[in-house]
Image (cartoon, rainbow, N blue to C red):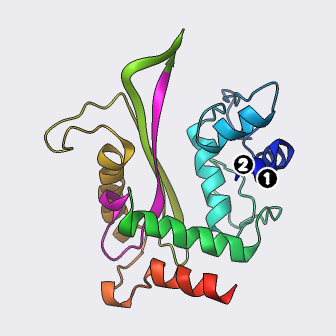
């Protein structure tokens, strides 16, 4: 799929998403994304599955917010604003809707099941990255993460949880991947913060089924 899009198309989209420049936070210490100098077919393929491009957690959170909010660019800030500033459109609203359904499906039936906080329609994506070393990658050293949004029918919050070098244990069935160590932490955080920010749970039987909704959308297209 990355080759179908092509290196230039992939790079242009990631640039619009804000992944190739520092996040414009109101802080002097800003992380610079690390991207390949030669963005050719090999780079496009590896970036498509998570290697070859390195960004900060704020990049991830801002990017996911832009994807799930209807497709409008979100500029992260630490300053409270009275009004939302409408960013440039980077995705069609229909595409954003389909991606929200897919992210909900990851939690309903995929690798992010442990992030499923009943009643709050969490959606997201797991991430398990090998830690880089001087000559390749560290053995058995991971950064395991989960980025989620909720409620997925009308997202209000994005949460990014990353755990540095988690250790597998009996509770995680010997795994240290994002789905086993970061997703459960996101679930607990959602369950505790949702009541504090005024989000009431919905009954499971009233919540839309992501798989059915996605199937309907595909048939409609």
Q: Are marks 2 and 1 in contact (CB under 8 Å)?
A: yes
Is 64 on the left-hand or right-hand side of 86?
Answer: left
Is residue 116 found inside the magenta-colored segment of the image? yes
According to the picture, the residue beneath numbered tag 2 turns out to be: 2
Q: Which residues are magenta?
A: 112-131
Q: Nearer the viewer, residue 88 or 7?
A: 7
- Where residue 126 sits: x, y (%)? 44, 50
Q: Nearer the viewer, residue 142 or 199?
A: 142
- Where residue 52 sits: x, y (%)? 65, 30
Task: Name which residue lies at 54% across and 82% down.
Answer: 215
Q: Nearer the viewer, residue 206 or 125?
A: 125
Of the 4 image quadrants, the one containing the C terminus is bottom right
Q: What's the mark number on residue 5? A: 1
Is residue 121 found inside the magenta-colored segment of the image? yes
Quadrant hosting residue 168: top left
Is 86 on the left-hand or right-hand side of 130?
Answer: right
């Amino acid at each position: 799929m990355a080759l179908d899009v092509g290196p230039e198309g992939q790079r242009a989209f990631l640039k619009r998403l804000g992944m190739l420049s520092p996040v414009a936070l109101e802080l002097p210490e800003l992380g610079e994304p690390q991207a390949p100098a030669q963005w050719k077919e090999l780079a496009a393929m590896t970036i498509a599955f998570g290697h070859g491009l390195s960004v900060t957690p704020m990049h991830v959170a801002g990017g996911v917010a832009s994807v799930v909010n209807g497709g409008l660019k979100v500029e992260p800030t630490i300053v409270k604003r009275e009004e939302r500033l409408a960013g440039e459109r980077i995705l069609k609203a229909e595409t954003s809707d389909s991606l929200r359904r897919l992210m909900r499906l990851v939690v309903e039936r995929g690798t992010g099941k442990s992030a499923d906080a009943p009643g709050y329609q969490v959606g997201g994506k797991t991430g398990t990255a090998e830690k880089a070393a001087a000559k390749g990658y560290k053995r058995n050293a991971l950064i395991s993460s989960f980025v989620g949004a909720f409620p997925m029918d009308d997202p209000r919050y994005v949460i990014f949880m990353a755990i540095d070098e988690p250790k597998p244990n009996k509770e995680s069935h010997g795994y240290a991947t994002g789905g086993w160590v970061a997703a459960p932490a996101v679930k607990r955080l959602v369950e505790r913060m949702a009541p504090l920010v005024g989000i009431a749970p919905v009954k499971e039987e009233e919540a839309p089924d992501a798989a059915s909704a996605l199937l309907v959308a595909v048939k409609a297209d």
